[in-house]
Amino acid sequence: MLVCREALRASALPVCSGNSLHPSLGVTRQFNRCSKTPQLVSRQLKIQCRDEGLKVDQLSKDKPKRTRKQAELKETIKSPPTSTVTADDGGGIYVVTGTKLKPSSITIPVGNREITVETGLIGRLANGAVTVTDGETILYTTACTAAESVEPSDFIPLTVNYQERFSAAGRTSGGFIKREGRARDHEVLVCRLIDRPIRPMIAKGFNHETQILSWVLSYDGRHTPEPLAITSAGAALALSDIPISKTVAGVRVGLVDGQFIVNPTVQEMALSELDMVVAGTDSAVLMIEGYCEFLKEEQLLKAVEVGQAAIATICTEIQKFAATVGKVPKSEDIYTPPAILEKYILDIVGDDLEKALQIKTKRLRGQAIGVLEEKLMKLLTEEGVVREELSAVKEDIQAIEDTVWDEEEDDELIIEDGEVDEGDIHVKPVFKMPVTDLFNPMDVKLVLKEVSSKLMRKIIIQKGVRSDGRSVTDVRPIEASCGLLPRTHGSALFTRGETQALAVATLGGGDMAQRIDNLTNTEDKRRFYLQYAFPPSSVGEVGRAGAPSRREIGHGVLAERSLERILPSMDDFPYTIRLESTITESNGSSSMASVCGGCLAMLDAGVPLKASVAGVAMGLILDTKQAGGDGEPLILTDILGSEDALGDMDFKIAGNEDGVTAFQMDIKVEGITIPVMRKALEQAKAGRIHILGEMKKCNPPPAGSLSKYAPLIDVIKVKPEKVNVVIGSGGKTIKGLIEETGVDSIDIDDTGLVTICGSTPEGVQRAKERIAGLTLVPVVGTVYRNCKVKGILAFGCFVEIAPGKEGLVHISELALTRVNKVEDVVNLGDFLDVKLTEINSKGQLRLSRKAVLLEEQGPVNGEQSDSSEGEYGVSKDSEESGGGEGGREQELANAS
């Protein structure tokens, strides 16, 4: 929006009158005089224009007799034919020129369907606002920037927030608090997906705080919002006046039945071997992140090519759209440090800086560069010069300014015993320059970083040696050990150079699973998760400690997904696995150290992994010709923190010799090509294989068996219709089982899979038997062994064939011979083998010990095979009557 405004006199309140000039051009309005302030006149006019559907291009006023000049804000905007609104305050006419705000949209083919990008309907006060629609999934994204710039720094003041509203799917949160609040982990990951490709595209030196907000307004359960979030953010920036070098878009690529699919549906992703998100411009790739089932490097490159082709189409269409309805970028707001500053820095500390960059250890290298930076601050900044000379000469500031830069004097300052020689008041500085060339301290820091980057590249390209003495393909020295922590279930310490990760594996039951509640996963549970911690002490600093940062969440998920593919199935290993990775030292590639350490910790905990995996981070020097090279991009294996900060790429790849399980690439330039990626993947494979070889030398090696402190877990399967029987009303039954058997937890899912977790084998076995009994469906003809006698009556005994399931063994069915008294054969608490012979209409069970004896021994000659009721002194009618004993049988049968 563009406003060119002269000073407004007081006393004008808009009162609408007048007629439309032309249906397509808008309206003209006349306003009466009143006593309002000029600011209110301006504001009221803008409100009226908004109500009229006008985008204000210019607000001006014919000069009245008495007026005072105010600051002018001049901007321009591309627009269709204009409209006008006028106002008269009695001393002059206010004229507002603007354009009709009409919704505009484009449709872009993506994969086998289309997406729609629309602007001008909602969010019209933002610098840029769009809605992007795919099927019935709709995202609304805005891009706004502050009017005033902030202090220049070495990073773009950009923040990204993404929110999935449960109302988009017609739901509310499953938690106690129903309003969306702090970002969930999944939303944080999408924020990072948006931020990483967009940040390098915002013009360097644009120091206005910029915010991108994205909301999922509608979700259809088929079309995932993550790739749309990247595209909508790129479109909002392209339509705004925020200066960017190129338009950005993103897509997801899946692999189903050997075919690559762009933006696959949720159902297709469930069958996919690959989950890759690609972001880029119309000509290059900026960011990739994905997870796969040990795919080969060539398959990944093919997926990137498919994604890049789709991105190029999207970016081209958005650029055409922006040329029609977008705003002119604020190119005049781009700040660059003085060009001469680089020459000064090279003259003062260039040689020393080159030597400092070749110091092998991180701490000493950082200290040396810090000394050089302090020297530059003293010589090149006004504060530094004044502070230095005040402490040395003890003179008035003005006197210093008059003498310190006297080019004609060559006398040096003479100090004896800490005192200034009074015979000499002139100072000869170490470095001479006009006082007008003193610089902002932040400019010095920014240019020093650029100079350091160029010198680092020059050293690597011309000498073939990196800061720590390695070649471009070397991996840092590796040390690994397991079993450091005696009471944990599994632990490992992995050290690679000056990067170190302490990984701890904890095993547990189903109640230890991580619950997830978002749009795409409705109260899902994860049986494996990795939690990454990066304390400030790992880099020798003091900082915030507490809840995980966005970076920690992102690094943890990358390491988690790298290891997820090697986990055993739930049938083979029914444990929930929690991995913690605490970074104790960091000098680059800490997330990949977490992959290596996490793999060893799980092996130490006795997890039967399908394979071992390792991770490595690759770097890039893209423009080698500038540093004296042959122009071919240079790939760096196992990068240091300084090579990450000063280089052009951070490409993390995890897997083994068979293929890749996870990858994440961030580019700090305007993108890289497929040939460069191919070279990086090939070099990374050699690095992974080397690291896996070093991990096999782990000393002491992983235990390879369950810790004695790990819980015992058993799994049984019940029919889904019996799930409610196990749980009971309000969870009463399952809670009772836990209390009765002494196990730690019993977890059951909707499919009927029951996981029992306990500290003793006896408790787990008891719980397993009780659940089996609760869900048992008795079958006539089945023999039940070791059944306990629970009650004795005159006509027989009650036997428990399973926990909670009892049946009657009639006195005539106790033995092969006549029995006069039940106690002659069995006593309370004895164990019998019985056979189920009948289930009557009431569900009561009739059991026979005699039938089991006959099967085992065969019939006995002369044995009376049947008996009359007179022989036993009790009739069957009396047994089944509602008497005391019969009543107990009825009660037990009903309970079962």
Image (cartoon, rainbow, N blue to C red):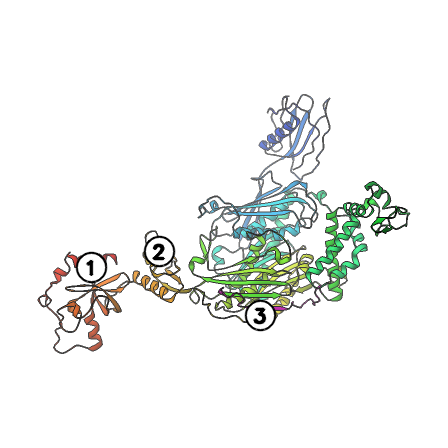
Q: Which quadrant holds residue 559? A: bottom right
**Magenta stretch: helix, strand or loop mostly:** loop
Location of mark 3 (residue): 695
The numbered mark at residue 735 is: 2
Mark 1: secondary structure: helix
The numbered mark at residue 889 is: 1
Q: In the rendered structure, which disc, 3 or 1, sits on the residue that comes first in sequence?
A: 3
**For this rendering, which residue is in front, 425 or 850?**
425
> Residue 459 placed where, x, y %?
75, 63
Asked whether 241 falls inside the magenta stretch, the response is no
CB-based contact (under 8 Å), mark 2 and mark 3: no
> Residue 537 placed where, x, y %?
62, 57
> Residue 711 placed where, x, y %?
43, 64
**For this rendering, which residue is in front, 355 or 205?**
355
Within 10 Å of disc 1 (Cα), the crowding (few <14, some 14-19, many 20+) is: many
Q: In the rendered structure, which disc, 2 or 3, sits on the residue that comes first in sequence?
A: 3
- Residue 347 shows in this picture: yes
CA–CA distance in space, label 3 to label 1: 65 Å
User: Which region of the structure is painted magenta?
Assistant: 466-489
Asked whether 486 falls inside the magenta stretch, the response is yes
- Residue 622 shows in this picture: no
Q: Residue furthest bottom?
A: 861
Quarter occupied by the C terminus: bottom left
Amino acid type of the residue tagged 1 in the rendering: Glu
Q: In the rendered structure, which disc, 2 or 1, sits on the residue that comes first in sequence?
A: 2
Amino acid type of the residue tagged 2 in the rendering: Lys
**For this rendering, which residue is in front, 711 or 390?**
390
Mark 2: secondary structure: helix
**In the figure, is residue 450 to the left or right of 107?**
right
Asked if residue 590 is positioned above or below residue 54 in the image, the reply reads below
Asked if residue 69 is positioned above or below residue 510 in the image, the reply reads above
CB-based contact (under 8 Å), mark 3 and mark 1: no
